[in-house]
Image (tube, rainbow, N blue to C red):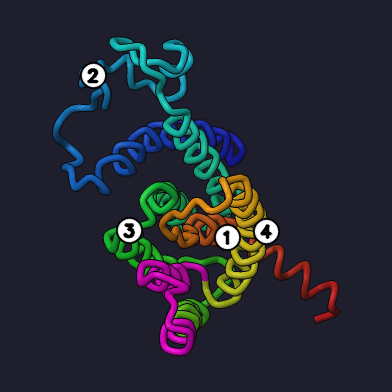
Amino acid sequence: MDEYYKIVAFILAGLVGLCVGSFLNVVIYRVPAGMRLDKPDSHCPQCKYKLRWYDNIPVLSYIILGGKCRSCKQKIPFRYTAVEILNMLAWLVSVWMFWEESIVFAVVHALSSSVLICVAFIDLEHMLVFDRFVVILAALGVVAVFFDPNYGWLSHLIGGAVGFGFFYGIHALFYYGLKKDALGGGDIKLAAAAGVLLGWQCLLLSILLASVSASVILVIWSKKRMQAEEETEEGQEGEENPLEFPFAPFLCAGFFLALSFGAPIIRAYLGLLGL
């Protein structure tokens, strides 16, 4: 019977995760634009065609329409479908990892994953981290303090302090010492909220994952930029274009991986050390 309920939970998590992912696309598009989430109705940003219910079926509508608007035939960015699929997978991970240990924490994991997806895609496009997402993540962290099957309340409180202190320290070092902005205020607040959610052990793992992956991508990005600059005509003057790099997507990926698999990874590592 328990296996039956778990199968039902997987199916529901997948379907609801897809539907919530469709709503996340609304959030990702409208919040940076300062629009309301409930009005106007969903529409094509090009021709303003009002989408019908059958145009909003997650993933399926994209496939049926061939990735194009029904009215103007403009290409629909695959990002919308990617968000739906990512959220579905994240919610399935919630059931897979935590359903048997704590249903409440499984729900916290699912909702946190959706918030992280919003933060990542908005920062990737607009280089902004909105406080409303940080507040929601912090509230979910407070719930996690009482229902985390792996770490106690003290770990979560220390995690919040470490998240804020570590990232603010980096910001202060660059801002006051080198007169440069290394991290935005949104990243600092996001790390503090994630620290409360994860606990300090998983927070440190997430920072490691985010830093390594961001460093690799930054090196590749910098090399491509240098090659592009070398290909410009010699002697041609242009405005300075400082390298801007959205760090929140890497943080969000690190937070998700640590929240999902951090505890077993840490236990396995400590086991190898004989601790």
Q: How many other residues sit within 10 Å of disc 2, few (<14), some (14-19) or many (≥20)? A: few
43 to 93, vertically: above or below: above
Reading the image, the residue beneath label 2 is 47
Where is residue 234 drawn, in percent x and y?
A: 58, 51
Tell me if residue 185 is in the magenta stretch.
yes
Say the numbered circle drawn on residue 254: 1
- Name the dominant secondary structure of the magenta segment: helix
In the image: residue 117, left or right of residue 199: left
Q: Where does label 3 land, which residue?
A: 133
Could you tell me residue 14's position as x and y percent? 49, 33
| Tag 3 and tag 1, C-beta contact below 8 Å | no
Mark earlier in primary sequence (3, 2): 2
Whether pointer 3 and pointer 4 mark residues with C-beta atoms closer than 8 Å, the reply is no
The span shown in magenta is 172-198
Estimate the spatial distance between the alpha carbons at disc 4 and disc 2, rounded to whole Å: 39 Å
For this orientation, the residue located farthest to the front is 235
- Give the image location of residue 77, x and y in percent: 43, 28
